[in-house]
Structures are given as C-alpha cells and as structure tokens.
C-alpha cells in the first residue's frame, strides 16, 4: 500500500497569525495514489497574504493561481481537475467568480457545483473553491 503524500504542510497557529489558535498541522494537498484532495483556496496567496478585498473576481483569480501551483507541486495540472465546488457569500458573486473559473478551465470540461453561504470563517472572504483531481496516466 502506498502512503499518502502531503504537500505544503503548515502549522495553523502560524498560518492564522493570532486570529485562531487551533494547534493543528494541516496540508494544502494530500495525494493518495493518483487522487488529489486540495484544501479550499481563496484570495489568500500561498504565503497567507490576502488579495482582492471586496473583489470576488480578483479573489477567484488568486485561488486559481494557487491551484495551478499546488497541482504542479503534486505532479498535475488543470487538465487533471474533475470537480470544483465554488462557495460564494452572495448570489451576485456567482457570475464574476464563474467567469474567472471559465477563463482558467477553457477547453477543460469540469464538474462545477456552486453554493451560496451566509459567511466564511474569515469575514473578508467572498469566495472559496474546493477541488478534486485525479492525475492522468502520462507518458514519461
């Protein structure tokens, strides 16, 4: 049996810098064989800096930039994405966020689920994407 690989493991107390004390270690990506589970991505870059306050399209763009990096680090790319769940804080954010996703996934048919929720853990977030991917067999 192959062990899971964990990418970008981090301490929550440092990541959340005094906002929350969770005392946990989490991973941005877990690879189990060819399957990738990717932590929800937002307008925070991979160093924790937030981009696009009040601009859901900018936040979605940053989330996609993160996703490309995380997929590459785990051996994949956007073509390996099977499903994206888009969470937004307001129904009006569906169209601009979906447009950004569509630009990035142009030519790659994915499953897209969208949900409108009342709030995120951090009040300045307007969106988050959760992503499931399966690495394709590639010629080496």
Image (tube, grey):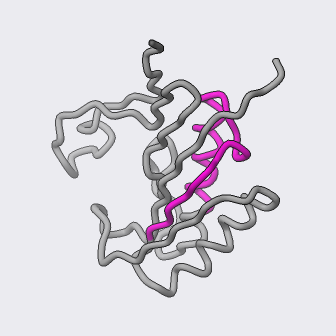
Q: Nearer the viewer, residue 72 or 35?
A: 35
Asked whether residue 75 is drawn in magenta, I would say: yes
- Quarter of the image with the C terminus is top right
Asked whether residue 64 is drawn in magenta, I would say: yes
Give the residue at x 58% y 56%: 62
Residue 87: % across, % down: 44, 68
Give the residue at x 42% y 82%: 90
Q: Nearer the viewer, residue 53 or 8?
A: 8
Vertical placement of 64 versus 74: above or below?
Answer: below
Vertical placement of 8 versus 120: above or below?
Answer: above
Vertical placement of 124 versus 41: above or below?
Answer: below
- Quarter of the image with the N terminus is top left
Horizontally, is 56 left or right of 75 in the view? left
Residue 101: % across, % down: 66, 64
Give the residue at x 51% y 48%: 45
Give the residue at x 21% y 46%: 18
Residue 68: % across, % down: 65, 44
Q: Quadrant of residue 57?
A: bottom right
Horizontally, is 26 left or right of 3 in the view? left
- The magenta stretch spans which residues? 61-87
Horizontally, is 27 left or right of 56 in the view? left
Q: Nearer the viewer, residue 124 or 79?
A: 79
Farthest residue, direction bottom = 92
Q: Nearer the viewer, residue 44 or 119?
A: 119
Residue 54: % across, % down: 48, 76
């Amino acid at each position: 049996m192959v062990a899971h690989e964990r990418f970008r493991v981090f301490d929550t107390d440092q990541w959340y810098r005094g906002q929350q004390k969770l005392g946990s270690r989490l991973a941005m990506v877990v690879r189990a064989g060819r399957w990738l589970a990717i932590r929800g991505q937002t307008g925070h870059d991979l160093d924790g800096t937030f981009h696009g306050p009040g601009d859901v399209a900018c936040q979605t763009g940053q989330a996609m930039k993160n996703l490309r990096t995380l997929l590459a680090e785990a051996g994949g790319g956007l073509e390996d994405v099977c499903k994206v769940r888009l969470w937004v804080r307001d129904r009006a954010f569906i169209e601009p966020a979906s447009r950004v996703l569509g630009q990035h996934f142009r030519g790659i048919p994915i499953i897209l689920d969208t949900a409108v929720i009342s709030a995120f853990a951090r009040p300045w977030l307007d969106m988050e994407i959760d992503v499931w991917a399966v690495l394709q067999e590639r010629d080496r």
